[in-house]
Amino acid sequence: MLPPSLGEFEEMVLLAVAAQHDQAYGVSIQEALEEHLGKSINISAIHVALKRMLEKGLLESRYGGITNDRGGRRKKFYVITIAGKRALDRQYELRTSLYQRIPKITFS
Amino acid sequence: MSHQPPKHALNFLRWFCREDYLEEIEGDLIEVFEQRSKENLRKANRYFFWQVLRHFRPDFIRSFKLFDLFRPELLRHNLLISYRSFVRNKTTFLINLTGLSTGLTFFFLICLWVNDELHVDKFLPHDEQLFQVLQSVQTPNGIETIEATPGPLAAALKDELSEVEYATTVIPATFNTSQGVISVQDTLLKAAAKYVSRDFFQVFSYPLLAGDSNRVIANKNDAVISERLAINLFKSPEKAIGQQINWQTQSLSGPCLVSGVFSDPPASATDHFDLVLSYDWYLDAAPEGGWADSSPRSYVMLKDGSQPDHFRNKIRNFLSTKDENLNSVLTIQRYSDRYLHDRFENGVVAGGRIEYIRLFLLIGLFILAIASINFMNLSTAKASVRLTDVGVKKVVGASRGQLVIQYLCESLLIAFSSLLLSSFLLAALLPRFNELTGKELQLGITPNLAMGLLLVTLITGIIAGIYPAIFLSGHQAVKVLKGKLRTVMGEVWLRKGLIVFQFAVSLLLIVAVIVVYKQINLIQSGKTLGYDRDQVIYFGVDRPGQAFVDALRNIPDVVSVGGGSLTAGKQLGGTSDVRWEGKPADNQTFFSAFWLGYDLIETLGIPVTAGRSFSKSFGSSDQVILNEEAVAKMGLKDPVGKKIQIGGEDREIVGVVKDFHFESFYQAMKPCILLLAPMEYAPRLSIKIRSGSEKPAIAKIKAVFETYYPGLVFDYKFMDEDFQRLYAAENRVSVLSRYFAGLAILISCLGLFGLAMFTADRRRKEIGIRKILGSGALQIIALLTADFTKIVLIAVTVGIPASYWLATRWLNRFALHIELHWWYFVFPAVFALLIAWLTVGLQTIRVALLHPVESLKNN
């Protein structure tokens, strides 16, 4: 069976989730990505990506406790699954192997 | 935490967002908003809006399918809950079931009847293009629209107007001259004929089983016979073609050849005839009187696509182009509309049977409404009991929609149980209903009918249930569970208002019963008729010879024998071509004309006020008798002995009779001329029989008839039965209104009964305490009934003016009508009040007599 495909934006979000292990939720992912990519990111896009990856089984989620922040709404934390980690690894391998095939080129 | 995100955006999000995502998305958005609002509130607001909108995409939108509300498990639950509530409140359930099922049954019956009525005469293929030409005549009583038209009209219309495809002149089968005897060898059959001009089968496209519709009636001695007649005489339609039959009436006799056979008109046809003969032949016996003389009917078929309204305007003054003395105008009406819209006022359609259809539909709806109101009232009255249920459900998370569905489910369940019950009732009542209405309605289960039944039931269920459902589900859970509920005044008012409506309608129907009954009685008693139609029989006969008449006279119980007959309520032919001395040039009075034989005036007991009746011993047949109205119209003083000209022939006035009603009671007295038809030409004989000896007398008359006319059936009618047939529609209303009123009262009382029982139950403790404090049973009964009495009294004050208005309107359509008495209204009011008291009283007495210990010991 083919492994689930991973879009570029989804990969970014997945990386951010993996990096913030167990503490990743919508806003924190948005902040991390904005910081790394240096451009503003729409939170709805993140929500869409998260939901899709949940469906593909790349992520798991759990609710946090109720606090006084966020108007009393619970945070939803995301954790990467084994499948998610494998997908990231595969993506990484794919890129490095392709990268290493690049002949030594100099641009003058 | 100082700032709140914009409410509308948040509400919008909550409305569309999937429940499992909502908390996360809402939280994230609020967090972002909180951060941003520290810098710039307005920007943060705008950003929040924008972000909410960005989330409005398929991934996050919840399912809006109504299916959620109808999930099988919920449905099962709702059914269970409904069932339990029925079991718990058996009385309420039975009241609702009885009310709704009877209401539905009657509504369906009415619908079946209406459907049948609407299809009368609609069976002809070119129905859209088939019109009857009518004539609006100026009379001193206003404009009157009649069917009779000048003989040459149809042909002229076809020749001169391009819109007319075909036109035909018809002498209807109901005319005296149209009743005759067919003989083929030894077989004699009575039959009713139409005399028609050539285009008849093009205009009325009755399917021809044999013969060519273009040519069937081309020759003077052609005859087209009905399928029934063809089978009776010649075994089959094909064998009938070319056969010779003999046709005999008092004025026309001779052989004709069968040129075609038409299939019998369906049951929905109003026009019944057995054979069709040539109008040209008819003219041999009764030459056309020109444009001033009206008696045949004219029908046209307009070309496809022509505008009837345009055509109507075009022919309006057609008659005056033919004869400038004529000032009556023509109009057209679709042939199939004639049945429902045959009443004209001032030359314009004003109603007819359609009014009864509307009336009955309205009554049916009212009865259904009354039954639905019972359901509404009982459900909302029980609200306080069921509200706890609502509160608990809401707390556990039921949405309002689900609760509404639950209560609708209950009302629909009742509605459909009622449907089940009412289909049995329908099957049981249909024969009786057919008897009442004179219809042959059948309960074939057609898809349309089934759909209709289901739809009506569904709508009734929803209407009955929607108000209680919305009312019950609208309460806030917290308030309900804390017991803070106070009955809202508006809701109590509504309940009372609905009872007022129920009783007002019931009152109206009772008044209707009385008024209709009295009016019908007045008409049928015959006292105001102007002649005596009791114990008078009449029958058709072919050229009664003097010997036959004498034989009849010799029967001991026969009081008198008169030639001819008066047929109740038939629109008569007549003429405006009457001249007398001193007639003003602009006088266009239309005189109805009767042909009658010797002794008919005596037989019917029409009082002769001047001169004498027709008599053999005086002079020749050029005598004429006028009614008083005709004398007044002519302005003649001392009319007896004067000569007038009718249709160009000299006639001598020999007598004047008192006015008598010869047409419908809807119309005022009309001027009328009575012409003498010699006995041997009389198409009918009327016989007055001594009261009490009808049976033996008729047997003897029959014996005499059979000796003189062997092979013919003695087919007689009583004149007063004729009258009953004439006012069949009114009779029907009279009988049906009795049923409707009874039903309305019954259902209203059922509702009142339920409410009273409920109120009494709820106030049981209060009553117990009152009794302990020394109040007597009577006082308590008074206390409990006072409320309902007030409601019924209000209903009475609303209902009386409404019923007065309706009664006056209906009665004004009769030229002769009863006066309204005060007790027609007071009696129903008292009756309604008594019934309400009785219903409520039964309940309250039970509670009032209860020992206080019984009612108080529970707490």
Image (cartoon, grey):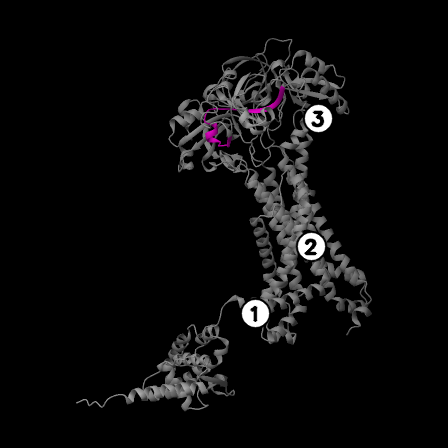
* Residue highlighted by disc 1: B400
Q: Is residue B195 magenta?
A: yes
Kind of residue indicated by mark 3 = Asp
**What is the magenta range?**
B187-208
- Quarter of the rendering occupied by the N terminus of chain B: bottom left
Confirm whether residue B801 shows in the render. no
Q: Is residue B79 left or right of residue B591?
A: right
Q: Is B165 located above or below residue B184 in the figure?
A: below
SS label for mark 2: helix
* Residue highlighted by disc 3: B534
Q: CA distance from mark 3 to mark 1?
A: 70 Å
* Residue highlighted by disc 2: B98
Kind of residue indicated by mark 2 = Thr
Kind of residue indicated by mark 1 = Arg
| Dot 3: chain letter | B
N-terminal of the pair, mark 1 or mark 2, is 2
